Amino acid sequence: MILLRHGQSVFNLHFSATRRDPGIPDPELTPLGHAQAERAAEELPALAPIRRIVASPYTRALQTAAPIARRLGLPVHVQPLVRERYAFSCDIGSPASDLRRRFPEHALDHLPEVWWPGEEEPEHHVIRRAAAFRAEMARLPDWEETLVVSHWGFILAMTGQSVTNGAWLRCDITAPAPEEVAWRHG
């Protein structure tokens, strides 16, 4: 499985400059973020076969998945389990009705109108979500051919590794989950 962190968002741009929450809910990608998504669309198919794309419902993840899905002719399976840890304004999502309007190419009927938590999510909840996703994917015979477009906190919970915007890494879900996760924002 390949885990891809979404491209740079408007939130990421401001937060990395100030280390303060700029108050931007469900931000879109910056021009750099779109370029990172295009680069992933060019490079990832050459690294491994991709037969399934799973993405978080946040706009930045859906925008990152779009050029890869177009290039490969695959649908994007929207999965709230792979969302970011709810801790900042960027983790307030868009209502499912808004996402259906903005992303008509995705099947979003399974998504509740409000699919993100209403309060800060404890770290152990993200680790539990990562374990549930591992178990769900392990039931698929071709899980290795899955690309997951996700977020810093979820990828950290899955692997114990911090990745930058637009970066990816391989994840063997049959390997043990990380014993420790260092929750420093990246």
Image: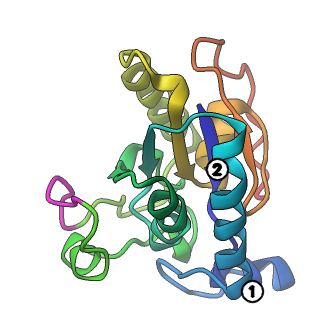
Q: Which mark is residue 86?
A: none
At 51% across and 60% down in the image, what residue appears?
71
Residue 149 in picture, x, y percent from top left: 54, 52
Which residue in the structure is indicated by mark 1?
14
At 40% across and 15% down in the image, what residue appears?
141
Give the colouring mode of the picture.
rainbow
At 74% across and 63% down in the image, what residue appears?
165
Left or right: 120 in relation to 88? left
Of label 2 and label 1, which has the lower sequence position? 2
| SS under mark 1 | helix
At 65% across and 34% down in the image, what residue appears?
48
Residue 155 in picture, x, y percent from top left: 64, 43
Q: Which mark is residue 4?
A: 2
Look at label 1 and name its amino acid: His
Quadrant of image for the C terminus: bottom right
- Give the residue furthest to the left: 109
Image height of 101 relative to 47, above or below: below
| SS under mark 2 | strand
Look at label 2 and name its amino acid: Leu
Overall secondary structure of the magenta section: loop
- Crowdedness near tag 2: few (<14), some (14–19) or many (≥20) residues, C-alpha within 10 Å: many
- Residues in magenta, as a range: 107-113
The answer to which of 97 and 22 lies nearer the viewer is 97
Left or right: 100 in relation to 158? left
Quadrant of image for the N terminus: top right
